Image: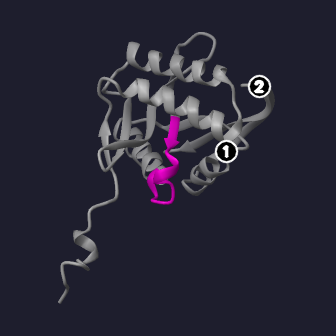
Amino acid sequence: MHSDANPPAHTVAPPYRLRPHRPGDMGWVISRHGALYASEYGWDMHFEALVARIAADFIDSFDSSREACWIAERNGANVGCAFLVQARDAQTKAPIAGSAQLRMLLVEPSARGLGLGRELVAECERFARERGYQRIVLWTNSLLLAARAIYQSAGYQMLTSQPHCSYGHDLVGETWQLDLR
C-alpha cells in the first residue's frame, strides 16, 4: 500500500516533457545558446550568430518526414532542445545519403542531472531509426565534457579531432558518429 505522498514509481510523471518546435522556439534556442555559452565558456557573439544561421536553415528547409526538433519543458518553461536534420555536405549543401545530423543539444543548468540530455539524444536516435537513416553524425568541441559523455555512452565514436580558433578561443572540434545499422 502507498500514500499519496509516496506514489509508486510507475505513476510518477517525468520531470520534463518533450514536444515539437512551435513559433517562438527558435528565438529561445538562439538566445539561450548565446547566453549559456558566453556565461559558461566565454564564447563571443559569433557562436550565437552560428546558432541563428543553423536555426534559420532548419526552418527554411524543414522536412518533417526527415527532420525534427524537440523542445523540453519543465513546469511550463523551456529547459532543453535537440535537433535532428538531414546531414549535408558543408560546401555543396547536398544531402549525404543515409546520414542524419544531431545539432544544437542544450540543457538549461536548472534541468541538468535529470537525464534530459540523454533522453534528447535517445529521441534523435529513435527518430533516425524510424526514418531509415544509417548513421547519425555530429560536431562538437572537446571542452563540452557533459555532451561528449552523453554521446560516448550512447555509442557514438569520435571520427576526427581538429584544432580551430572560433568564438574568441582556441578550441578542438570533434566529429562523432553513431552507426545505426
User: Which segment did they paint magenta?
Assistant: 104-116
Residue at x 62%, y 52% (from the top left corner): 146
Query: Mark 2, mark 1: which one is toward the viewer?
Result: 2
Q: Which mark is residue 168?
A: 2
Q: Where in the figure is residue 52, as x and y percent of width and height?
A: 52, 19
Residue at x 18%, y 78% (from the top left corner): 4
Camera sees residue 102:
no
- Examine the rendered structure and indicate whether residue 113 appears above or below residue 58: below
Q: Where in the figure is residue 88, as x and y percent of width and height?
A: 54, 20
Residue at x 55%, y 44% (from the top left corner): 179
Label 1: element kind: loop
Kindly identify the amino acid type of the residue bearing the numbered disc 1.
Leu
Viewer-closest of 64 and 37: 37
- Residue sitting at the far top: 92
Q: Which mark is residue 90?
A: none
Q: Where in the figure is residue 101, as x and y percent of width and height?
A: 52, 32
Q: Where in the figure is residue 7, as x and y percent of width and height?
A: 23, 77
Label 2: element kind: loop
Q: Which mark is residue 144?
A: 1
Camera sees residue 163:
yes
Kindly identify the amino acid type of the residue bearing the numbered disc 2.
Gly
- Determine whether, in the image, residue 129 is placed left or right of residue 162: left
Give yes or no for residue 110 being in the magenta stretch: yes
| Quadrant in which the N terminus appears | bottom left
Q: Residues within 10 Å of mark 1 (few under 14, many from 20)?
A: few
